[in-house]
Amino acid sequence: MEVKIMPRKDELQCLMSMPNLGSYVGKWIAVVGDDIVATGEKGSDVYKASKEKYPDEIPFIMKVPEDKVMLL
Amino acid sequence: MRSRQRRRAYNCRYLSYEIPPTRPGDEPKHLKLPLIKIEVASETESIGTVALIDSGSTSSFLPREIALDILRLPITHRDLPVEGAGGKFLCDIVKAKEITLIKGVIPIHTYSDWFTYIPKEPIELPYAVLGRDTIFSNFEITFRENEHRFVLK
């Protein structure tokens, strides 16, 4: 059986070059390649949407942090 | 003659972005965070996300949504009190099969059978946090705050 290995993408670099990233603040986003492919209020929904569109990719998802003081 | 092994340095940029103003007349805000890409794996799933490098945290944390709702990591301990700067809060501990630190597209370190805290409500983390029990144990980390960079060595 042939094992298909997907090349890794540098999603962080991709996010750094997105001028409109700040408009997603507080939302979960999924990134594949150079694009945001899903957004939403729940990480699990964004994960599912990303897996449906790109089943062979390891989904990259994150919540775009808000501008607030964080102290654990 | 003593041989010296040179350790590779990974020069990383902060993730920075502009948050547009919500009210007319307000200025946009600029966020700059020392985030690194990680891949977290359960027995059946893997996910890429980001983690904050936090020298002030003795332990590492994962957002609950990623740990339980997406990866369905097994909980090994429940309701442990954790002392934070803002007071005590409760956490569960989960076990991930692996967590890999990634610079660009290069995996630079993997932790296997990784136990990590997940805060319970009302604490909601927007990202994973790597504290002194993980990344600081394996790398010398220099923050160049004025350049919005950090270096792992």
Image: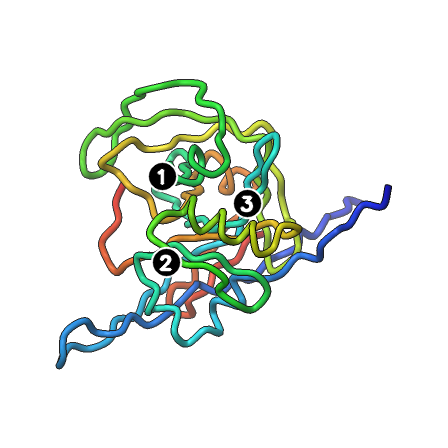
Pointer 3 and pointer 2 on the same chain: no
- Pick the front one: B53 or A37: A37
The label on residue B57 is 1
Type of amino acid at the residue the image marks with label 2: Val
Q: Residue at x 45, y 35 (%)?
A: B67
Q: Which residue is mark 2?
A: A64
| Image mark 1: chain | B
**Mark 2 Cα-neighbour bin, 10 Å: few <14, some 14–19, many ≥20:** some
Quote the CA–CA distance across marks 3 and 2: 16 Å
Q: Residue at x 72, y 48 (%)?
A: B5
| Image mark 3: chain | B
- Pick the front one: A24 or B85: A24
Please state the horizontal and vertical placement of residue A1, each as a whole percent of the image. 86, 41
Q: Which residue is mark 3?
A: B47
Quote the CA–CA distance across marks 1 and 3: 23 Å
The label on residue B146 is none
Mark 1 touches mark 2? (CB < 8 Å): no
Q: Residue furthest bottom?
A: B25
Q: Residue at x 25, y 45 (%)?
A: A71
